[in-house]
Image (cartoon, grey):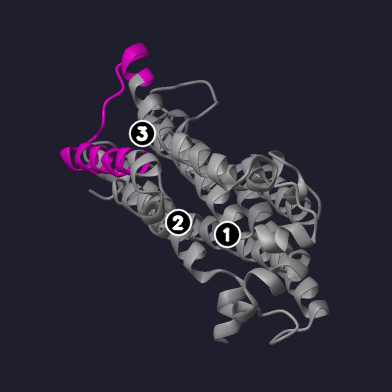
Amino acid sequence: MIPFLRLIRVKNLLAILVAMLGVAYFLHKQNPYVVIDFHPFHYGLLMCSTLIIAAAGHIINDYFDLKADRINKPDALVLTKYMAKRWAILANWILNILGFLMAVILSWHYDTLLFVFVHLLSINLLWFYSAYWKRKLVLGIVILAALPGLVLFLSSWFFQVLNERHSRFSSYQEETWSTFLDYRFIYFVAICAFFINLSREIIKDIRDIPGDSLIDAHTIPRQIGTQKATLLALIILQLPAVFFLILKLISDFSLPSFYTTLVLSLLEGFFLVGFAAYFLAPNILAKYMRWLPTIALILGLTCLYF
């Protein structure tokens, strides 16, 4: 059982669950006096389908990465050691079909193709990433970095589908009433998650150079070297702060709480220290570099709750 949990990356699935619950909690917390249409069972179905498709993506990724993983992480290997490769393919298909059927139910119930489209897109992106695009120089990591942010967008779109009506408004017909919520902070977190995950994938590719060389994967660290790749990852970690400043200059965007301001300031401090360590203490940076994006993602998700 434990090897299977490693195969589906239960920690990553837990992060998705926390993110989706965080979106629902944030919107209700920020709008205490607003009537928000929300169906807990259907939202649970959306979370379940998203988690199932993500688990299927992790399985198929390990299937196509088997050759490299024998070099990069032989002790953590699950396929061929605890599960035959043919069972991995079967598990991937079963999970994808289950997740897609849940999306069909939601789309049929709410008369929208949104959930079907997003889930079908995710299934195909995860498959083609694992089979082909992972070996491309930029395309693979951009897609992988974008998918976690898509979870936050999808959660917001669920609320929009339930609350924003397209029928002609009538003050006498409740089914035509709309509730317009402010999703900007959630979108901001999603875009920041993209930058942080992009940096995280570059750092991961630095560690995976031996296995990636074996399968001739054209990763950024293999093309530009580990030092330049590390610098690039650190520069990308500065982009959330740049994005925030741009939003402040061109709109009335603001952070929802003092806690969020404190967390984002703290994270930017960590990123700047890491940037300085690149030039002053590269050995120390190499030891702790992998933890910077992980800590940022964890603390960033807590901003949806506090």
Question: Where does residue 79 sit, x and y in percent of width and height?
Answer: 72, 79
Q: Earlier in the sequence, mark 3 or mark 2?
A: 3
Q: Residue at x 67, y 65 (%)?
A: 56
Kindly state the secondary structure of the residue where label 3 is placed: helix
Residues 234 and 92: in front is 234
Q: Which residue shows up at 32% across the image and 37% down it?
A: 272
Residue 239 on image: x %, y %: 43, 31
Quarter of the image for residue 34 reads top left
Pick the quarter of the image with the N terminus.
bottom right
Question: Sequence order check: which comes first, mark 1 or mark 2?
Answer: 1
For the residue pair 255 and 197, the one nearer the viewer reads as 197
The crowd level at tag 3 (other Cα within 10 Å; few <14, some 14-19, many 20+) is some
| Whether residue 162 is visible | no
Q: What label sits on residue 185 in the rendered view?
A: 3
Q: Earlier in the sequence, mark 3 or mark 1?
A: 3
- The reply to whether callout 1 and callout 2 are in contact (CB within 8 Å) is yes
The residue pinned by badge 2 equals 290
Q: Amino acid at mark 1?
A: Arg
Question: Mark 1 sits on what residue?
Answer: 207
With 120 as the anchor, is 40 left or right in this view?
left
Seen in the picture, residue 280 relative to 100 is either above or below; the reply is above
Q: Main secondary structure of the magenta part?
A: helix
Which residue is found at the position 25% from the left and 38% from the top? 30
Query: Element type at marker 2?
Result: loop
Q: In x, y percent, where is residue 165? A: 50, 29
- For label 1, the crowd category at 10 Å Cα-Cα, with few meaning under 14, some 14 to 19 and many 20 or more, is some
Label 1: state its secondary structure: helix
Instruction: Report the magenta residues as a range.
Output: 246-275
Residue 254 colored in magenta in the image: yes
Image location (x, y in percent) of residue 5: 56, 77
The amino acid beneath tag 2 is Arg
Task: Name the residue type under label 3.
Answer: Phe
